[in-house]
Amino acid sequence: MKTTEIRIIVLEYQNISELPENDQFLLAEARKITSMAYAPYSGFHVGAAVLLGNGTVVTGNNQENSAYPSGLCAERVALFYANANYPDSEVKTIAISAAKDGVLVKEPVKPCGGCRQVLAEVEVRFETPIRIILDGQNSIIVLNGVESLLPLSFSKKDL
């Protein structure tokens, strides 16, 4: 038997002003787009802002549907829009924010399993690690690469 240890490096900031300027802008965009989410069932509004390699910023928010699971998470809305409209531009950074009753959530919001898998696919597609910014009142977490969210992920190399 062999034991392998997986380590994750997490950068933690106390507030948005501690982030580099580009990350501050991207996170502000994610926060802004949460208010436009369609979340009449959960009341949990999520926004995502994606910085592409060509400098374009694309945003998305969660879109719920009474026929679960027909809705879509903010991360996938933003990533799919980016891939549909800028198919040759890699994703450099994604910032994700969430609010409940118009108030930023206390702990950094984390992507669901489906969104983690989509992030992994985008990263493999462009062979570029994605910087991930997770927003919350108590702290902001920054990860360098999807491997930090989804170690041992399934990808095209597994097919």
Image (tube, rainbow, N blue to C red):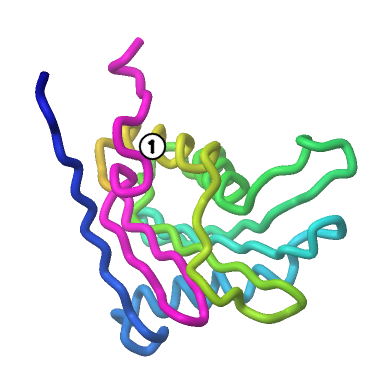
Q: Residue visible at 50% across and 40% down?
A: 83
Residue 79 on image: x %, y %: 52, 46
3 w.r.t. 74: above or below: above
Q: Residue visible at 33% across and 79% down?
A: 13
Label 1 packing within 10 angstroms: few (<14), some (14-19), many (20+)? many
Q: Is residue 37 magenta?
A: no
Residue 31 picture quarter: bottom right
- Left or right of 24 in this view: 20: left
Q: Residue furthest front?
A: 1
User: Which residue is disc 1 drawn over?
Assistant: 120
Q: Nearer the viewer, residue 80 or 6?
A: 6
Residue 150 on image: x %, y %: 36, 40
Residue 117 on image: x %, y %: 46, 35
- Left or right of 137 in this view: 148: left
Where does the magenta region start and end?
130-159
Residue type, label 1: Ala
Q: Residue visible at 47% across and 73% down?
A: 27
81 w.r.t. 134: above or below: above
Q: Residue furthest right?
A: 66
Residue 119 picture quarter: top left
Residue 20 on image: x %, y %: 29, 80
Q: Residue furthest bottom?
A: 17
Q: Nearer the viewer, residue 12 or 48?
A: 12
Q: Quadrant of the C terminus?
A: top left
31 w.r.t. 87: above or below: below
